[in-house]
Image (spheres, rainbow, N blue to C red):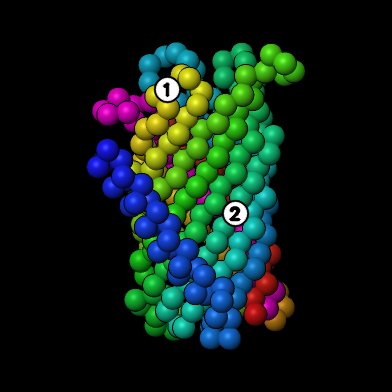
Amino acid sequence: MKKLLSSRFSRLGAMAAVAGVLALGVWTPAQAESVRLGADYWKLESTVSFPGTTPGDQFIAGAAATVRGSVSILPNLVTELQYATAPGLAGQQDNQKFSVDSSQLLVNASYLVLNQGALKVGPSVGYLTADNGFIWGSGASAVKYNVRSSGLLVGGRAIVTLTPGLTVQAQALYGPRVTVKDDSGKTPPEYTSTYVDLQGAVSYAIWSGINLEAGYRQMMQTAKKDSAELWAQRSGGLFAGVRIEF
């Protein structure tokens, strides 16, 4: 019981800390260095593998829409909210087809300890929530279940200005203990996983305050119960969109 309460308070504390930093940026626009809003089209492909030879790998593909908002507070503190939704992803396992309604929210904050003109580097902390709703079959006989992940992520961010108007950004986040809640009935109802999120993008200013952006995002998650691996998922793809800065 003490372990359960400690885990819950830890998660709530992490969420409160990140949300507090984000709220500070949202509610102090007059003091913000910059505010950026944007939207992306993300071509997503995913493979889920299981230990042993059966069942076979799951292959999932489709498109996701991502909206982003970020605020630079003072010269060194950047907060960001990123929401992606991908309804109706097409999946296949062996000779069976299924669909997945997927969504993900990532809130993170970065403190740029190195801010030397063209180069900015610093640590990041964030909180992830993700929901994947699986649908096998159709009609009254369809089998539906959800796999939800949530947890604290830590890592770093780097921003490099190559020339005026041309910027490269990269971010790496790692979650050593991301909780998974799974109501498929094929696994324990709750277990933990490790999670890696890698993102890189190039941004080009086409007009004052308007930027085109393109990049790649890769996510890797390995789920375990005690020491036994349950599944490993690798997802990623190219994205492109527009950013408005003011």
Residue 213 lies, in percent from the top left, at: 63, 63
For label 1, the residue is 187
Height in image: 138 above or below 175?
Answer: above
For label 2, the residue is 83
Q: Quadrant of the N terminus?
A: top left
Question: Looking at numbered disc 2 in the image, what kind of residue is underneath it?
Answer: Tyr
Q: Quadrant of the C terminus?
A: bottom right
Is residue 165 rendered magenta in the image?
A: no
Quarter of the image holding residue 122? bottom left
* Circle 2 SS class: strand
Using the image as rendered, state which of residue 162 and residue 159 is in the foreground: 159
Is residue 10 among what the camera can see? yes
Q: Residue furthest bottom?
A: 30
Question: Looking at numbered disc 1 in the image, what kind of residue is underneath it?
Answer: Thr
Q: Main secondary structure of the magenta part?
A: strand
Of badges 2 and 1, the one in the foreground is: 1
Q: Which mark is residue 150?
A: none
* Residue at x 27%, y 29% (from the top left corner): 226
* Circle 1 SS class: loop
Dot 1 alpha-carbon crowd within 10 angstroms: few under 14, some 14 to 19, many 20 or more: few
Boundaries of the magenta span: 209-231
Mark 2 → mark 1, Cα distance in angstroms: 27 Å
First of labels 2, 1 by sequence position: 2
Residue 194 lies, in percent from the top left, at: 36, 41
